[in-house]
Amino acid sequence: DESPRRSWNDTVVRGCKEQSYKTTAEEDKAKLRRFDQHLGGKELDTVNRDMIERISQAKLDDG
């Protein structure tokens, strides 16, 4: 039995709705927007830790 594939975009929207009560919700959204530049349109099962680390490191390098 395979789980349905989920997109980055669908997962972000769902996560934002579920976490909207958090005091850091707006800060979390800003962080997700930075990742969305690189991950938007991707299927979630294609996103891995190495990809996230490269995006994070590029952000640190850019300042």
Image (cartoon, grey):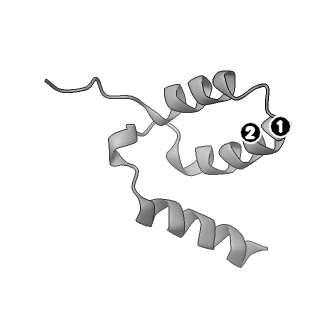
Label ID, residue 35: none
| In the image, residue 1 above or below residue 54 | above
Quarter of the image with the C terminus in it: bottom right
Q: Quadrant for residue 51, please give it.
A: bottom left
Identify the residue shown where x is 79% and y is 33%: 22
Horizontally, residue 42 falls left or right of residue 1, namely: right
Looking at the image, is 13 positioned above or below residue 59? above
Mark 2 and mark 1: Cα distance apart in space: 5 Å
Kindly identify the residue that appears in the image at 52 percent across and 67 percent down: 53
In the rendered picture of this protein, how many numbered marks are placed on residues?
2
Task: Work out whether 12 lies above or below 37.
Answer: above
Crowd rating for badge 2 (residues with CA inside 10 Å; few <14, some 14–19, many 20+) = some
**In the image shown, does 3 or 47 lie closer to the viewer?**
3
Alpha-carbon neighbours of circle 1 within 10 Å: few (<14), some, or many (≥20)? few
Amino acid type at circle 1 is Glu
In the rendered image, which quarter is residue 20 located in? top right
Secondary structure state at the residue bearing disc 2: helix
Residue 48, horizontal then vertical, whole percent: 39, 56
Identity of the residue drawn at 74% across and 43% down = 28
Residue 4 or residue 23, whichever sits in front: 23
- Circle 1 — which element? helix
Q: Which residue is mark 1?
A: 26
Which residue corresponds to the image point at 60% horizontal and 25% vertical from the top-left? 13
Residues at circles 2 and 1 in contact by the CB criterion of under 8 Å: yes
Residue 50's x, y, as percent?
A: 42, 66
The image shows residue 42, relative to residue 18, as above or below, that is below
* Name of the residue lying farthest toward the right: 23
Judge from the rendering whether residue 16 lies leftward or rightward of residue 12; answer left or right: right
Residue type (three-letter) at the residue carrying disc 2: Lys
- Measured as percent of width and height from the top left, residue 25 is found at 79, 36
Mark number displayed over residue 29: 2
